[in-house]
Image (cartoon, helix red, strand yellow):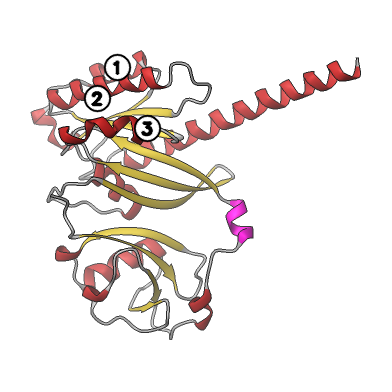
Amino acid sequence: MINTNNVTIQIYNNANPRKSMKVHYLRKETDRRKFMQMCSTVLELRASRIFDQSGKEILDIDRIQMGGNYFISSGEEFNNFNSNFQNSSAESKQLVQYRISLLGMGSVGKSNLTTRWVNNEFFEDYSLTLLDKYTKRVIVGEQHCQIEISDTCGQEAYTSLRTQWMKDKEGLIFTYAINSLESFEDIKNTLLLFQQLFKMQEQVPSIVIVGNKTDLGSERVITHDEGKQLAAQFQALFYETSAKNGSNVNQMFTGLINDIIQKKQFKKVEEDTQNQKQGWCSLI
């Protein structure tokens, strides 16, 4: 059964609505104080008031609706411009969107890897996810990126959907837990599926293999070298992470995004070179 306790909303800086972020939290575990702390961290302000898009102040966070847009204030009144606010087309043109999916068995920590990176949060209680989506804007080098992350379900009943979850993505994160041999074997099977799916394709997503839960080092059954060897076999990046303490999480996401960008740039150089050659042929 999917946990309806999960809430995903878009929050905006009331004073500067171009600063925004999609956030995810657990309703039953988040009171107003925790919610404001989350908003303060994500939007880099001292959050004290919440408004919906019509300008009505939200005093009870239980009234926050799934999928809604909310404006966070440091104490000032609602900015009336926000009632009609939409991202400008100019801003949208500056942003390059990349789509990433996390794959792996249930309970390996896919959701917590995502929430750690997006909101710097970690949830002890595991809840079943079918497909949650998160968005984060980052600057990598000189490129402004909007990263859409699909956190997929790892339960056996949904393994048939993995092919679908791998399509139309620029990056894929194959996740296992270092204390679970079963999750490591599962990711091998998913990598073979990936290999088969993209065998004849020109556009192949960047991939990273992640050994999560390094905070449970005393329970380790998969060595670092075993993970590294698997990554080499599939020409993937490799990281060991801990969603719980944040170790290597930022490095892993940044490494993957960098690889995506480099692939896109290399592809563009190839296309430009080919077009130039065709132009020379026409002149001759």
- Vertical position of residue 208 compared to residue 22: above or below: above
Q: Residues within 10 Å of mark 2 (few under 14, many from 20)?
A: many
Q: Which comes before the other along the chain, label 3 or label 1?
A: 3
Three-letter amino acid code at disc 1? Answer: Leu
Residue 237 horizontal side relative to residue 184, left or right: right
Three-letter amino acid code at disc 3? Answer: Met
Q: Is residue 28 magenta?
A: no
Q: Nearer the viewer, residue 95 or 199?
A: 199
- Calculate the distance from the C-alpha at mark 2 to the C-alpha at mark 3: 13 Å
| Mark 3 or 1: the one toward you | 3
- Calculate the distance from the C-alpha at mark 1 to the C-alpha at mark 2: 10 Å
Residue 42 horizontal side relative to residue 90, left or right: left
Residue at 9% across, 30% down: 218
Residue at 43% across, 84% down: 76
Q: What segment is highlighted magenta in the picture?
A: 89-94
- Calculate the distance from the C-alpha at mark 3 to the C-alpha at mark 1: 19 Å
Residue 151 picture location, percent across and down? 30, 43
What SS does tag 1 mark?
Answer: helix
Mark 1–mark 2 CB contact (< 8 Å): yes
Residue occupied by mark 3: 166
